[in-house]
Image (tube, rainbow, N blue to C red):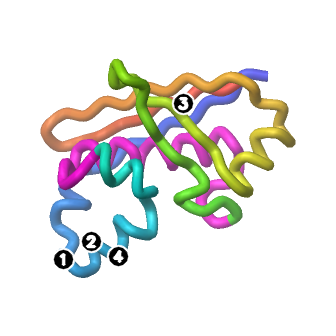
């Protein structure tokens, strides 16, 4: 069965969070590798946030049963994003019989969007 998920976020939402709260949010949502990839690039962080939401929609759980860091958005050397699942997200992937993922992340000046397909 083909499954898909999409999410869009305003990049400004991350930029406007107070610095102390933003640091806690980033530490709760992103893995160390994701933080290294994005640094302080809010468009990159927003794109990965949208991607995590889109993956959770594919899995049919939303965030809650699955933690933010259970979904990791990495990249290959050429820069293409890839999905790596852990813990409950990995278990759900196995339960649903998902073997292949495709992901696209894009952003402009104000919005970031992610589209995910799984089979």
Front label number (2 vs 3): 2
- Identify the mark at residue 22; answer none if there is no mark: 2
The x and y percentages for residue 91 are 79, 49
Please tell me which residue is depicted at 57% across the width and 36% down the height of the picture: 5
SS of the residue at dot 4?
Answer: helix
Nearest to N terminus: mark 4 or mark 3: 4
For the residues labelled 2 and 3, the Cα–Cα distance comes to 26 Å
The disc, 4 or 1, on the residue closer to the chain's N-terminal end is: 1
For the residues labelled 2 and 4, say whether their Cβ atoms are less than 8 Å apart. yes
* Residue range corresponding to the magenta coloring: 38-64
Residue 31 appears in which quarter of the rendering?
bottom left
- How many numbered dots are placed on residues in this image? 4
Dot 1 corresponds to which residue?
18
**75 to the left or right of 96:** left
Q: Are marks 1 and 2 in contact (CB under 8 Å)?
A: yes
Position above or below: 108 against 30: above
Q: Can you tell which of label 4 and label 1 is closer to the viewer?
A: 4
Residue tagged 3: 116
State which quarter of the image contains the N terminus: top right
Looking at the rendered structure, the secondary structure element under dot 1 is: loop
At which x and y percent is residue 4? 61, 30
Q: Which secondary structure, mark 3? A: strand
Tag 4 residue: 24
Mark 2 or mark 3: which comes first in sequence? Answer: 2
> Observer-nearest residue: 34 or 4?
34
Say which element carries label 2: helix
């Amino acid at each position: 069965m083909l499954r898909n998920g999409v999410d869009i976020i305003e990049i400004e939402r991350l930029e406007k969070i107070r610095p102390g709260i933003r640091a806690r949010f980033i530490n709760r949502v992103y893995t160390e590798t994701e933080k290294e990839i994005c640094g302080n690039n809010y468009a990159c962080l927003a794109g990965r946030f949208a991607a995590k939401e889109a993956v959770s929609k594919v899995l049919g759980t939303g965030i809650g049963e699955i933690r933010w860091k259970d979904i990791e958005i990495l990249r290959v050397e050429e820069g293409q994003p890839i999905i790596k699942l852990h813990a409950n997200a990995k278990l759900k992937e196995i339960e649903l019989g998902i073997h292949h993922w495709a992901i696209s992340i894009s952003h402009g000046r104000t919005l970031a969007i992610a589209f995910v397909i799984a089979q």
